[in-house]
Structures are given as structure tokens and as C-alpha cells.
Image: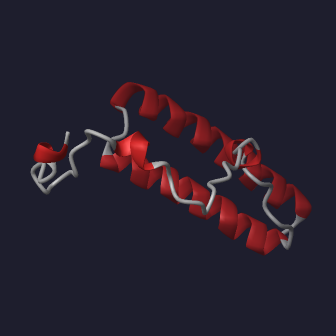
Amino acid sequence: MSTSEIAELRRTIGQLRQCVGALRSRYGDASAVRRLANDVERLDIDTADLDGTPLAVPAQAKSAERVQVPDTPYDPALWHGADDEGVGGYKRDQR
């Protein structure tokens, strides 16, 4: 493919992405909308493969903040009086 064909394809994929965004606003997170969004991403990936250039990292992935979770045990007082979900409150007598 020529550079102009790739540019036109990328422009068209951008328009498709906008249309899918409008559909998501109207229909929410319907499975058909998710499939369409997945198809647009697949087109973008395949275009990058044809062009030989890596895809840009999506904006939401760039702004994702990592949260450090410590390996140390939590303070048992934090769980005082809480029931274990699914067990049915087997420690009710210890309050």
C-alpha cells in the first residue's frame, strides 16, 4: 500500500471510531457495540502491521496510575466485626 492509501485508511478508521463512540453514547455497553469497538481496534492493528509502524499507546493507558499494594499483612482490627462473605458470619460470637 502507498503512503496515501495508509493515510486514507487511518482517517477512515478514525471516523469509524467516532461513529462507534456515538453508538456507545446511545446504546451503552451493549455487546454489539463492544464487538464493533473491537473490530475497529483490529482494523487499527492490521493497518499498523501493513504500515510497519507501531501503534500509539491509547490515552487511557498512558494516564493509568499504578497503585502500590504492600506485601505486609493488614491490621486485624481493620476486619473486626466484619463477616466473611459467603461463610454466613461464622464469627458472630466473637464481637
Image height check: is 69 above or below 80? below
How are the colours assigned in the image? secondary structure
Outermost residue to the top: 26
Percent coordinates x, y for residue 58 in the rendering = 72, 49
* Residue at left offset 87%, top offset 66%: 2
Outermost residue to the front: 94
Percent coordinates x, y for residue 64 in the rendering = 69, 45
Quadrant assignment for the N terminus: bottom right
Residue 47 vs residue 94, the one in the foreground: 94
* Residue at left offset 21%, top offset 45%: 83
Quadrant assignment for the C terminus: top left
Q: In the picture provided, is 67 more to the left or to the right than 92? A: right
Q: In the picture provided, is 91 more to the left or to the right than 25? A: left
* Residue at left offset 81%, top offset 59%: 5
Q: In the picture provided, is 40 more to the left or to the right than 12? A: left
Percent coordinates x, y for residue 62 in the rendering = 76, 47
Q: In the picture provided, is 31 more to the left or to the right than 63? A: left
* Residue at left offset 58%, top offset 63%: 42
Percent coordinates x, y for residue 11 in the rendering = 74, 45
Tag count: 0
Image height check: is 24 above or below 56? above
**Quarter of the image holding residue 41?**
bottom right
